[in-house]
Amino acid sequence: MKIKICGLNPTRDVQLCIDLKINYLGFVFYERSPRNIHPQDIKVLSHYKKKNSSFVAVTVNPSDEFIKQNILGNFEFIQLHGSESKDRVADIKSMGLKVIKAIKIKEEQDINKYKEFDNADIILFDTPGMEKSLKFPKNLITKLPNGAKYALAGSISKDNVENINKLGVNFFDLSSSLESQTGFKDHLKIRNFMKKINELKN
């Protein structure tokens, strides 16, 4: 079972997530987001011993210049939430990054879009809300492909993760459900969620 937490603060949240063995730590570069971080904030990331965690830069249609200035050397993964094509994914991978491509799902036919991105390292099936905490349609969860490279985002919490896992999902991406106020991760919620995940693993 893999866990990714998005919208983290580079100083406040990172050590906790590493200590809890969270697989992917996501940092948002999107100015309209309450979780947006400034490129200057990422300097502190080099101070952490990541152990088995990977850092992910969450972006929307990033330019080559932005990637070269801010992402290379600081992150292993870049997450793409924009209108990027398969060719664009290939271009970014050629720079030395692994790619998570987000696919927004409104209806069942949207799921098949993932087949266009067979060169992405991870496919993230997401709601169309872009951080608006929309619930992923339960009737579509069972239609998603299974496997280690497919992740699900959309109102996942300690209370429903067991049921979603029973539907075949093993890779969970969380953000707002781990906050007590928008943009601020609640460390107790993170600890309780990971406690639940460890119970499920055992």
Image: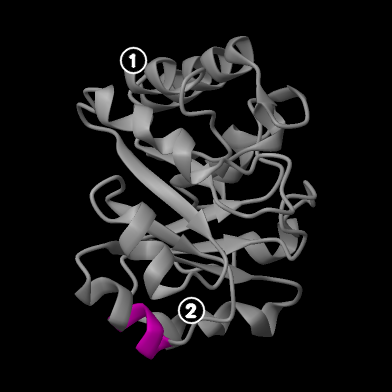
- Residue 3: tell me if it is visible: no
Q: Which residue is mark 1?
A: 19
- What's the amino acid at mark 2? Tyr
Name the residue at 67% across, 85% down. Answer: 109
State the image coordinates of residue 27 (x, y, percent, origin top left). 50, 42
Q: Position of residue 45 (x, y in %)?
A: 34, 31
Which corner quadrant holds the C terminus? top left
Q: Residue at x 66, y 32 (%)?
A: 157
90 relative to 149, above or below: below
Q: Which label lies toward us, 2 or 1? A: 1
Residue range corresponding to the magenta coloring: 86-90
Q: Residue tagged by mark 2?
A: 114
Q: Would you call the spot at circle 1 few (<14 residues within 10 Å), some (14-19), or many (20 or more)?
A: few
Q: Nearer the viewer, residue 200 or 81?
A: 81
Direction top: furthest residue: 188
Q: Of the two numbered discs 2 and 1 on the same chain, state the one appearing first in sequence.
A: 1
